[in-house]
Image (spheres, grey):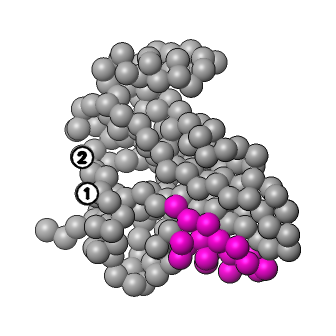
Amino acid sequence: MVPEKMFLTKGVGYHKEKLQSFEQALRSAGIAHLNLVKVSSILPAGCKIIPKSKGLNHLKPGEITFCVLARNDAKEHNRLVSSSIGVAIPKDQTAYGYLSEHEAFGETQQEAGDYAEDLAATMLATTLGVEFNVDAAWDEKREVYKFSGKIVRSRNVTQVAKGRRGLWVTTIAAAVFVALES
């Protein structure tokens, strides 16, 4: 099975129980009705990113569904919690891309999203032979990716939330694969 389509989603949940906080985050993301199976970080060649609403139309409740999932939990008042998925898509549509998961504490949505995107682009760049300085700032690396002509774009989906007194907070970000039947 090679997925032909993928959608990005995110969610947050709060509850006194950790598991129910996770369930609320899945509901917030619109994917609580699926049996999720975590996979690693490869975006199949030619896999199209579609809107979440279209992707969900192809999935049935209880369906075993493959995804790249970032999840973070905390039970600490005012703790900033984030989960992010980075995506790097090569210009050559016959080549595969990369997805990355990033979970952090204390990072803003911009910081977590940039980091996840940078991770995915870095992994893709190394497989494509694009040289760059790993210690360079994110914006500097992004310029290298653009000028290489091998990476067409990168993006992220990121969920950030602040902890509440007495409750678990769970953030999730996911790249959900959809395999369409011929």
Residue 31, percent from left and from top: 47, 73
- For the point 34% across and 72% down, the residue is 56
Residue 66 relative to residue 78: left or right = left
In magenta stretch: residue 107: no
Question: On the image, which quarter does residue 165 sit in?
Answer: bottom right
Residue 104 relative to residue 128: left or right = right
- For the point 47% across and 24% down, the residue is 142
Identified by mark 2, the residue type is Gly
Residue 30, percent from left and from top: 46, 73
- For the point 54% across and 58% down, the residue is 173
Q: Is 37 located above or below residue 112 in the figure?
A: below
The alpha-carbon separation of the residues under discs 2 and 1 comes to: 7 Å
Q: Which range is magenta?
A: 10-28
Asked whether the beta carbons under mark 2 and mark 1 sit within 8 Å of each other, the answer is yes
- Which mark identifies residue 4? 1
Q: Is 156 located above or below residue 125 in the figure?
A: below
In this figure, which residue is indicated by the disc labeled 2? 46
Identified by mark 1, the residue type is Glu
Could you tell me which secondary element the residue under label 1 belongs to?
Answer: loop
Look at the image and tell me in which quarter the C terminus lies: bottom left
Label 1 Cα neighbours within 10 Å, binned few <14 / some 14-19 / many ≥20: some
In magenta stretch: residue 25: yes
Residue 181 relative to residue 135: left or right = left
For the question of whether residue 70 can be seen, the reply is no
